[in-house]
Image (cartoon, grey):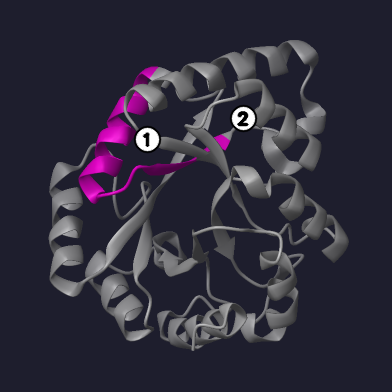
Amino acid sequence: MYKLGLVSISFRKHSPLEIILAAKKAGLECIEWGSDVHAPCNDTTKLEEIVALQKKHGIYCSSYGTYFRLGVSSTEELPQYITAAKTLGTSILRLWCGDKAYAEYTEEEKKLLFAECRKAAEIAENNNVTLCMECHNHTFTDEIEAALELMQSVNSPAFRMYWQPNQFKQLKQNINYAESISEYTRHIHVFNWSGDERYPLEESIEIWQKYLEKFKGERALLLEFMPDDDIETLSREAQALRRITGII
């Protein structure tokens, strides 16, 4: 049901090889490569190096973590991100939706944003990929009602969501969000934060099991950021992730 992996931006200062070796050591099987440092969409050499390393070490790319912002970045740039994702071996791209919180959008701004989202969804459909919005703070999808309205308005199988708990909200709010967008969710970012503080994942095993009860079907669970930013901590966090899922 679950594929266990890692988000490469957890270790921006480390090379793709170091990240792949750490993932293998931790018993993980996939990586979401970030477009900002490790896998720029316009750097064919870096992309091909990652592909070769993945093949050599038996790791695959779960998704392409872009910093493309719908409503800000031009949709004319989207095809080069799609090409990069396919080079890495994935059809799933993570995007951000908008550049401010849902509550800050006027009706006219929302209308324009949704038009851009529909345009992006059409590009994705034509290229057989899926664009997934991250429910990130200070983006349009930071609230349940916003994400649902967006999904229903765009109404495309090529336009979906990621999910992650919001470290500034209460447990019940996060569970409600998870349940509400479960059917639209492809991958899940996993961490244990409270406000600005990070904690070991093993301290939130029961909470994460409650979250995952809301999701059915196969998904990648991707560790995002270590509590201490140390790549050596990855094995411990991966072990906690296996305990959460029952994969021991």
Main SS of the magenta part reads helix
Q: Is residue 210 magenta?
A: no
- Residue pointed to by mark 1: 129
Q: What's the amino acid at mark 1?
A: Val
> Residue at left 60%, top 22%?
154
Given residues 141 and 12, the one toward you in this image is 141
Judge whether residue 91 is colored magenta.
yes
Tell me where residue 195 sits by quadrant.
bottom right
Residue type beneath disc 2: Gly
Give the secondary structure at mark 2: loop
Question: Few, some or many C-alpha atoms within 10 Å of disc 1 (few <14, some 14-19, many ≥20)?
Answer: many
Segment colored magenta: 76-96
Q: What residue is shown at x 53% (from left), y 69% (from top)?
A: 225
- In depth, the one of 15 and 180 nearer the eye is 180
Q: Is residue 73 above or below residue 85?
A: above
Tell me residue 73's x, y (percent): 47, 25
Badge 1 element: loop
Residue at which label 2 appears: 98
> Residue at point 33% right, 35% down?
81
